[in-house]
Amino acid sequence: MGYKAALDKAYGELSATRAAGRLSVRFFSDEYSADLEKRTLKNTKDGRIADDYIAVLILHYAVRKMDGLPPLTGKWISFRALDGGEVYYPAFRKRAIEPVIKKYGANPEGLLSNMERLGAEKGSAGDYSIKLNPFDNVPALVSIFGQNEEFPASANFLFDESIKRIFATEDVAVLAGLVASKL
């Protein structure tokens, strides 16, 4: 499904769940405002219209939020545990994991330098990890194992199991890619 079709569908779903014409969603440290009548999604800080792939992700989250987000389970799962995650994993790895390895593989403790800027906290996985909430009630844990004489660097993304009831697998891949780009 192309972005136009996905956007049309998401705006339609939102319109069906919300009486008012505006909606606001926090995504990382930014606030986005959706005008459901004009079908626009703008960053409230700078007034820029969100790129289509970001808009689709935010709108999908907003639809689930309007229906009521599932409670957090406290159980971390990998991308591969999502429906179709095993099949889509090579693309996910390229989009999310490899950029983290490239940036922090030789300097894994550098991952921690982003905690304050991202509103993250130190995690307990890997050599170093951070836990952040790109959306309210959507935690992600990013971990890195630094390279050594025997093994190359590796990284992983984990999500609360409730993400399965919020996003489709493709959306989780986009979200993880956006997380990686902000690290």
Image: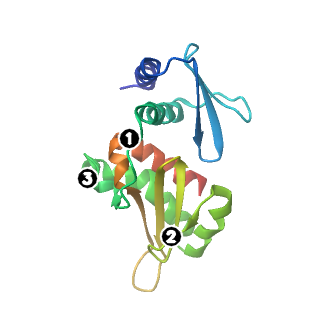
- Type of amino acid at the residue the image marks with label 1: Phe
Looking at this view, is 84 or 99 the one in front? 84
Q: Earlier in the sequence, mark 2 or mark 1?
A: 2
Front: mark 2 or 3: 2
Indicate the position of residue 120 as horizontal and vertical percent values: 59, 61
Work out whether residue 181 or residue 17 is closer to the camera in this orientation and state it.
17
Image point 40% across, 53% down: which residue?
72
Position of the N terminus, as image quadrant, is top left
Mark-to-mark CA distance, 3 and 1: 16 Å
In the rendered image, which quarter is residue 115 located in?
A: bottom right
Give left or right: position of 113 versus 176. Answer: right
Q: Amino acid at mark 2?
A: Gly
- Whether residue 116 is visible here, answered yes or no, is yes
Q: Nearer the viewer, residue 32 or 46?
A: 32
Task: Characterize the local packing of mark 1: few (<14), some (14-19) or many (20 or more) Cα atoms within 10 angstroms.
Answer: some
Q: Quadrant of residue 119?
A: bottom right
Q: Which mark is residue 86?
A: 3
Label 2 environment density (alpha carbons within 10 Å; few <14, some 14–19, many ≥20): some
Q: Nearer the viewer, mark 3 or mark 1?
A: 1
* Mark 2 and mark 3: Cα distance apart in space: 25 Å
Residue 31 at what x, y percent from top left? 64, 38
Q: Which residue is mark 2?
A: 123
Q: SS class of the residue under badge 1?
A: loop
> Is residue 10 positioned above or below 71 on the image?
above
| Marks 2 & 1, CB-CB < 8 Å contact | no
- Amino acid carrying label 3: it is Glu
Q: Position of residue 143 (x, y in %)?
A: 47, 68
Which quadrant is home to the C terminus?
bottom right
Distance from disc 2 to disc 1, alpha carbons, whole Å, reads: 23 Å
Q: Secondary structure at mark 2?
A: loop
Q: Residue at x 25, y 46 (%)?
A: 84
Q: Which mark is residue 167?
A: 1
